Amino acid sequence: MKEKINKYKDVIPYLFFGVCTTLVNMHVYWTCAHVFNLSVLISTVISWVLSVLFAYVTNRKYVFHSEVTSTKGIIKEISSFFSCRVLTGVVDLACMLIFVDILNVNDMLMKIVANVIVIILNYVASKLLIFKHTVID
């Protein structure tokens, strides 16, 4: 049983902070799109930037407990994190443009669906590529 808990110890905090990141993403998107009347594209990009910054800090500290302290290591970690997030940001943007702008699906419903897909892809990338529990000096 302890082996199972250790195996999945990152999943629960990742899901919690994934939900928090999704809330940041959705709130910022809604504010940009519905309060400031910005386009789907601009609203999605702004919400992506702010939610990725939030996600990096929470993932580094509370989910994957990164022990990287050197400048070189942190730069490598941030570069990997943002590179992977750019790829999933394209998935988010494509979902929003195709389903909202072209197919006229409700933007907030599509934002939820896109965020679920992105959370799954981001977890895999974070676990396997970015925060590997290694100290880089």
Image (cartoon, grey):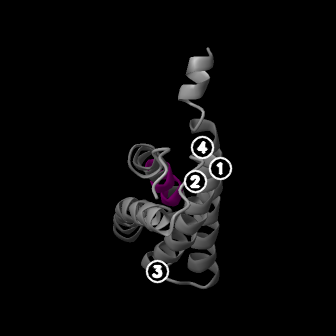
Residue type at mark 1: give it: Tyr
For marks 2 and 1, give the CA distance.
6 Å
Instruction: Farthest residue to the top: give it.
Output: 1
Magenta residues, start to end = 110-117
Which residue is label 3 attached to? 42
In percent of width and height, residue 55 lies at 57, 60
Which residue is label 4 attached to? 15
Above or below, comparing residue 107 to residue 34 in the picture: above
Residue drawn at the location 58% of the way across and 38% of the way down: 10
Q: Quadrant of the N terminus?
A: top right
For marks 3 and 4, give the CA distance.
27 Å
Residue type at mark 4: give it: Leu
For marks 4 and 1, give the CA distance.
11 Å
Above or below, comparing residue 72 to residue 33 in the picture: above
Residue type at mark 3: give it: Ile
* Horizontal arrangement in the rendering, residue 82 relative to residue 12 (left or right): left
Which residue is label 1 attached to? 62
